[in-house]
Image (cartoon, rainbow, N blue to C red):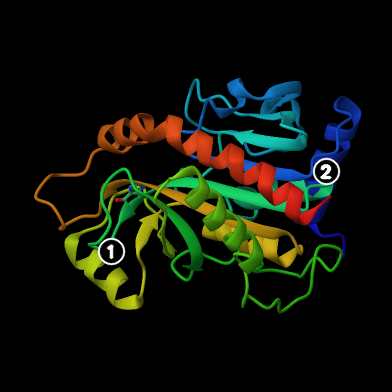
Amino acid sequence: MANEVYNKLLKCYGCFKEKVNFKPGVALVLGSGLGDYADGIEVVAELDYHDIEGFPVSTVPGHQGKYIFGYVGKVPVVCMKGRVHYYEGYNISDVVLPVRLMKLMGAEVLFLTNAAGGINTDFRAGDFMLIKDHIANFVPSPLIGENIDELGVRFPDMGNVYDKELRQVIKRTAALAGIQLQEGVYIQLTGPNYETPAEIRMCRTLGADAVGMSTACEAVAANHMGMKICGISCISNMAAGITANPLTHKEVQDTADRVAPLFKQLVTECIKNIYADKIE
Ligand code: HPA
C-alpha cells in the first residue's frame, strides 16, 4: 500500500526540485527571535510554503512562511522561516514534514532553535540553553503509523539525538565568543496554553530544564532519518509558578527580540564551526 505521508513528502520534494537548484549542508529552523536571521545571510533563493503542493501552511491569517536558501560564510544552508506547531491542529506527520523535506534536499545537519520557558531555577530569562536531550512523550510520535522504510527503521535508537560532537563544537564556539551557555533537557508539551505551576513542578521532577511547544517531534523525525541534530533554546521567560508574573506571549517575544543579536551571532559562529568540523 502506498504510504500517504511518504507520497505527500515526495510530492513536496518534486515541487522543490522544480523550483530551486540548491543543495544545503545545514538545515536551520528559526524560532522566536531568529525570525529575521536570514536577512543577514547571503540569500540565493526563496521558496514560499504556499508554492509547495500539500505543504502544511499556517492557519493564522497573514502568517508567512518560507524556506530561504543561502550561505552563512561558506556554508550552504536552508532556513525555515516559520514552522507549524502541533497546537495549530495539524497531524504530527505534517508538523515534521518540513524538516523531513530539508533532509531530502540534502541537509545532513539539523540546527533547531526555539523560545522556551525556564524550569531550572538556575536559569534566567534571556539565557541560552544547549539542548542535550529531550522528553517528547507528551506529544504523539511522528513515527506512529506504517513505517516509511525509505526514511528510516521501525524502531530507531534515540540514545544520541542531540549529537555529542555537535554539542562539543557549540560549547567551544560559545566559550570562544564569551557567550554564556546553559545546558539541559527540553520537554515538549502540546500547548497552546502555558503550563500551570503544578505542571511545571511535574516537568522538573521528570528531569526537564526548559519547556516549549515544538522541536522534540522534529528531532525525532530527523533522527529517524539519520540527521545529525543540535538545538539551542532561548529562555524567553521563567516557567509558570517560578515568578509571580502571569505569562504572556508578549514577554516571550520581547525577551527573544532583546537577545536576538547575540543569539544570531552564536548561531552563525556555530554553523561555521560545525561545517568546518563535520562536513568539509
Ligand atoms: N511554556 C511553554 N512554551 C513556551 C514557554 C513556556 O513558558 N515560553 C516559550 N515557549
Image-quadrant location for residue 239? bottom left
Viewport quadrant of the N terminus: bottom right
Q: Residues within 10 Å of mark 2 (few under 14, many from 20)?
A: many
**Taking the image as drawn, is residue 127 in sight?**
yes
Could you say which is closer to the camera, residue 50 or residue 39? 39
179 on left or right of 57:
left
28 to 4, vertically: above or below: above
**C-alpha gap between disc 2 and disc 1:** 37 Å
165 on left or right of 24:
left
**Taking the image as drawn, is residue 100 in sight?**
no
- Cβ–Cβ under 8 Å for marks 2 and 1: no
Badge number at residue 105: 2
Q: Residue at x 19, y 67 (%)?
A: 198
272 on left or right of 249:
right
Could you say which is closer to the camera, residue 272 or residue 129? 272
The residue identified by callout 1 is: 120
Q: Residue at x 51, y 68 (%)?
A: 133
216 to 145, vertically: above or below: above
Image-quadrant location for residue 151? bottom right
Percent across and percent down for residue 78 are 72, 36
Q: Earlier in the sequence, mark 2 or mark 1?
A: 2
Q: Nearer the viewer, mark 2 or mark 1?
A: 1
Q: Provide the secondary structure element on which disc 1 rests.
A: loop
47 on left or right of 214:
right
Could you say which is closer to the camera, residue 127 or residue 177? 177
Q: Provide the secondary structure element on which disc 2 rests.
A: helix
Q: Residues within 10 Å of mark 1 (few under 14, many from 20)?
A: many
